[in-house]
Amino acid sequence: CISTVLKGICERPELYKTLEPHLLPITKQILSKDGDFIEYLEYALDIITFLTYFPDEISDELWEVFPMIYVAFDEWAFDYLNLMVPPLENYIGKAPQAFMSKIAVIENTNVSYVNLVVSIVTKTLQEDRASECEARKALSLYMSLLLNCKGMLDNYLPMINDHVLTFMGKQASAETPTTRIALFVV
C-alpha cells in the first residue's frame, strides 16, 4: 500500500521529504538486528529505494539506514540481496562524495561504507549458496562504485580486480556465460 503511494508521487519528489520522517522509523524497525520482521523486509527495501531515488538529496537520517541494510544482509537476510542492491546503488549514485566519506560502527569497529559494499560483494561471491543471479547483482555494486566514484577508489582497485579475477576463474567452466559477462564488464 505504501509503495503504491510512493509510486504515485514520483513526479513530485519534494513530497518524499515530508513522508520520510514517518516512514524511516518503520523501516528501521524492520531492519533491526533481530530479524523479527523479515516478512516485511521487501516492503522496507522498496520504501528505502523510493526515498533514495526520487528526492534530490539523501538526508542524514536516511544515511543511517545504509549500515542497517549491511547488517541485515550479513546476519539474517542474505537471500534478500537482490532487493538490497537498488537502494544501495541509489546511495552510491545519488551522493558519491557523501558515500565515500561515511563511516559506520559495526560491532564497535569503524567501517567505511565502501568497505561495507566490498564486504557484501565478497561474501556473495564466496558463498556457495549464492545463485548466479545474486552474484551478478553483487557485481553490479562494484559497477556502481566504479562508475560513480571515479578517482575516489584508487586504493580499492587492486582488491576489486583480485575479487573479479578469482571469481572469473571459478566461472570458466560455467554452462551459461551470463555471470562471466558481468565479470568482464567490471
Image: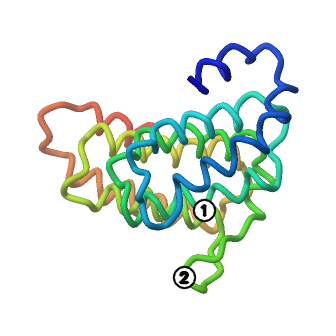
Q: Amino acid at mark 2?
A: Glu
- How far across and how far down the image is residue 15, in percent? 84, 26
In front here: 63 or 165?
Answer: 63
- The one nearer the camera, 175 or 99, is 99
| Few, some or many residues within 10 Å of mark 2 (<14, 14–19, 20+) | few
- On screen, residue 148 versus residue 14, left or right, reads left
Q: Tell how many labels.
A: 2
Element under disc 1: helix
Residue ID at (25%, 50%)? 130
Name the residue tied to disc 2.
Answer: 107
Relative to residue 157, is residue 26 depicted above or below? above
For the residue carrying disc 1, how many other residues have a C-alpha within 10 Å: few (<14), some (14-19), or many (20+)?
many
108, above or below 32, in the image:
below
> In the picture, residue 21 is in which quadrant?
top right
Q: Residue at x 32, y 56 (%)?
A: 125
Which residue is at the front of the view, 9 or 159? Answer: 9
Residue 63 percent across, percent down from the top left: 73, 55
Mark positioned earlier in the residue sequence (2 or 1): 1
Q: Where is 159 relative to 90, above or below?
A: below
Percent x, y of residue 122: 39, 62
SS type, badge 2: loop
The image quarter containing residue 1 is top right
Above-or-below relation of 18 to 63? above
- Residue type, mark 1 in image: Pro
Q: CA distance from mark 2 to mark 1?
A: 11 Å
Tell me residue 55's x, y (percent).
80, 31
Q: Dot 1 corresponds to which residue?
A: 67
Residue at 28% over, 50% down:
168
Label drawn at residue 59: none
